Amino acid sequence: MTTLILTEKPSVAADFSKALGVRTRRDGYYEGNGTLICWAVGHLVELFAPEDYSPSFKKWSLATLPILPEPFKYKPIKKSGKQLGVIKKLLKTPGLDRVIIATDAGREGEVIARTILLQAGFTDKGRIMRFWTSQALTPAVVRSTLEKLQPITDYDRLWRAGYYRQVADWMVGMNGTRALTVRLGDLYSVGRVQTAVLALLVQRRRERENFKPEPYVVVKVHFANEKGKWIGTWFKEKETRIVDLDAAQGLVARLTAEETPGVVLSAEKEKKSDPPPYLFSLTDLQQEANKRFGFPAKKTLNVAQGLYQDKKCLSYPRTDSRVLGTQNLDMVKKLVDKLAETAPALFKGVDHGRIALSNKRVFNDAKLTDHHALIPLKNLPPSATADEAKIYELVLRRFAAAFHPNCHYENTKIVTGFSSETFQTTGKIILSPGWREAWPIKAKKEDEAYIPPLVNGDAAHKEKVAAEKKETTPPAAYTDALILKEMTNPGRYVSEKAMKDLFRGEVGIGTQSTRAQILEILIQREYAKREGKTLAATDKGCYLVEMLQKTAVSRVLTSPEETARWEMSLNRIALGEGNNENFLATIKEFVQKSMDELKTVVMEGEAPVGRKRTGEVVGRCPACGGEVIEEYKNFKCACGFVLWKKIAGKNLTPNMVGHLLRTKKSGPYNGFISKKKKRFTASLILAQKEGSWQVTFDFDSNGKKGGGKKAAGEPAPWSSSPNASGSFSHSQEAASYVSQPERPTTLASKPAQNQKPLRGLNQTGPRPCPACGGSIIEGKRGFGCSNWPADKGGCRFVIWKTLFGRELTESQLTSLLSMKPTRPCNLTTSDGRTVKTRLRLTNTPQGWMVMADPDEQGIKHFEPVVCAH
């Protein structure tokens, strides 16, 4: 009898392996004691693209909209197909009597598991159980929770909610994006969440543009008596600003002429205390890192992910919880003791009485979501970068502060009467800093001012009258921290009390793990741009939002309130309260009406384009039939098809490209330059090969080469297929013959001064820079990208000549640049042991790194080496 445990990520599988003593690691799973433990890598399957349902949907056309598949289907994600294959194979294990779903305890975790089982054809719910906890997965928690498994049918409601969210987002995004892109002639994507966030950015830009500063005056009087000096600010019914400038001038004149001393009308002192701040959720950490260091939200997530995944010194970062589970009390006690050894100054003030289940600000099962709060798990390793050290210190300090005493302080408020007017003075004195010792907060200037020990009836002699002329200021420009705050609690944008209460609870715009990505998508789509620390909507973003806001139906896409309504409906379904059929029917009805509207609505004004272009239509796209338009550096279709203006050293004119698009052959033309720097004449052929459109050279027309095929040593094909990022670019093979400035990618290109070309690699074919496509050149200490100068893009990619204590061989370098693992090699660990491993070049959230594979037991002996200088 065999049990299969399916987890969401390898690190969780390792926690189960440790807890259950399942030590044997296979390719993609652990095995032992009648138990198999495997893992997903996030989502392993995705919804079909429109063209997967029918080839007719490949061409973007208004005639095919709306696209509303019935039923929706899933397909494997190519990059994770191997792991999906492992899970499918394990699900067919003879004697498999039980499958335990141990993905994250939430809606998305349920979707990941159910879609995998669906793709594998495993539908026997009688053999499927659910492991459910948000506690940190210590061995004790794993073992105790395994004794409390629930039938998978108890969580069908969660699966339905997750499924409906996926298909609703698909219907809205796919149809809306296609309709607007075809109508406006440029890529205009829309989405249930991204468009609502963009609307916030647009509103803030317009508020700042339309803001008109209003002058006002603040009047202050400097008082003194035998006890000391203080400054009082004029106020009347809580208002301290005087907007009537003439009245302010008259008041100052009267106060200046007044000789009769004033009197202290009231002197109030109140002792208060503030509890420690909550532990970090991801959004809280992103806001703090943006305020302190200017980190964009995506950078903070990537750094935290690296500290969790590679350095293993932080807990899972994609969390919206600010608390821990009650079962983690013993773990926290051990953590505090361990971390105090290396950071005694931070932990010396810890009140160990607060490391108890009675401390509900830390230990609270009722407020746990999919994952517990972000906490440190061990000390920061010496190999950490400066950015990693900054993020780790924030989490460490917040963790230490959570177990410190309250901060005790005394508030003082003085009201002084003078010349029939009232003046207020406030101050704050810290009596006992408590948690502020671990989490310092900069005091406001007015709080730091000394206030004498005044009492009612004390005299107040005027020393000076000051009038400060000021102007009202516009709403602050959005930073990542501010927009994340709005996304977390956008209550001010809604009117109904029920909706405001909802926003103050658990529902916001987007999720903890998607908010940073939403901001990056807006930038990639050229709807928003960063200017220093600020984030602002572009003209293109403003056009989209303001155009949608003029419509009767589609305008709801720009409404944070409507976005929250959808999320509230999904929450009800997840709780088993909502009507499943009504929700999908409502979304389909909206999409149908929105498409009818967007097909015919009058688009006022000219739609801005993201990049400079001439706007001239040169022909029809061979991929989708749309318009190919001349832009600044290329000829491009809205679907992503692109032809660069320079091929093998020759500039293509609109007429040349138009003829090529019409007849699929153009030329012959002279003036092409081979990689051997020799000029040649050839025609251009546009043909589809392996699913992508490519431009190749044809020499038959000038009699030098035959068959229309590229001869050895002559220029290679020129591809217009989509790359991994979803945009279109030339293939790396063809790009090696290009002299256009964007992507010089030859290993054998002419070296810059004092730089040597790569030794011996020309025989193996071109190996471009994996980061930017530039040429790889040899330097003193490594092999780096020729695009390192700022005017060429400032690419910092490099593979060092010495890795893990040994010199890199030529064959290893070739393998790494080819994105292949090296042959097995022997490396020496820090304790002198020899380990046989392979090296591989990997693109991580922290950048390109050379990594050494774990040993046969799955143990990693070497920290990754960053490929940057």
Image (cartoon, rainbow, N blue to C red):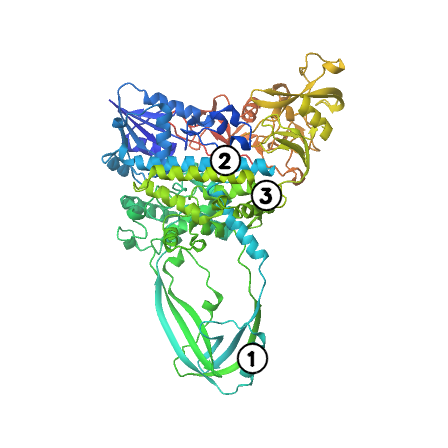
Q: Is residue 270 visible?
A: yes
336 or 155, nearer to the observer = 155
Q: Position of residue 252 (x, y in %)?
A: 56, 79
Gap in Å between the C-alphas at discs 2 and 1?
64 Å
Q: Amino acid at mark 3?
A: Met
Disc nearer the start of the sequence (3/2): 2
Please identify the quarter of the rendering in which residue 634 is found. Answer: top right
Query: Mark 2 or mark 1: which is in front?
Result: 2
User: Left or right of 367: which side holds 55?
Assistant: right
Q: Which residue is tagged 3?
A: 603
- Going 47% across and 25% down the picture, which residue do you hit? 53
The quadrant in which the C terminus is found is top right
Gap in Å between the C-alphas at discs 3 and 2?
17 Å
Q: How many marks?
A: 3
The quadrant in which the N terminus is found is top left
Q: Which residue is tagged 2?
A: 175
Q: Secondary structure at mark 3?
A: loop
Disc nearer the start of the sequence (2/1): 2
Identify whether 745 is placed above or below 439. Answer: above
Q: Amino acid at mark 1?
A: Val
User: Are the residues at dot 2 and dot 1 in contact (C-beta closer than 8 Å)?
Assistant: no
Please identify the quarter of the rendering in which residue 354 is found. Answer: bottom left
Q: Which residue is tagged 1?
A: 252
Disc nearer the start of the sequence (3/1): 1
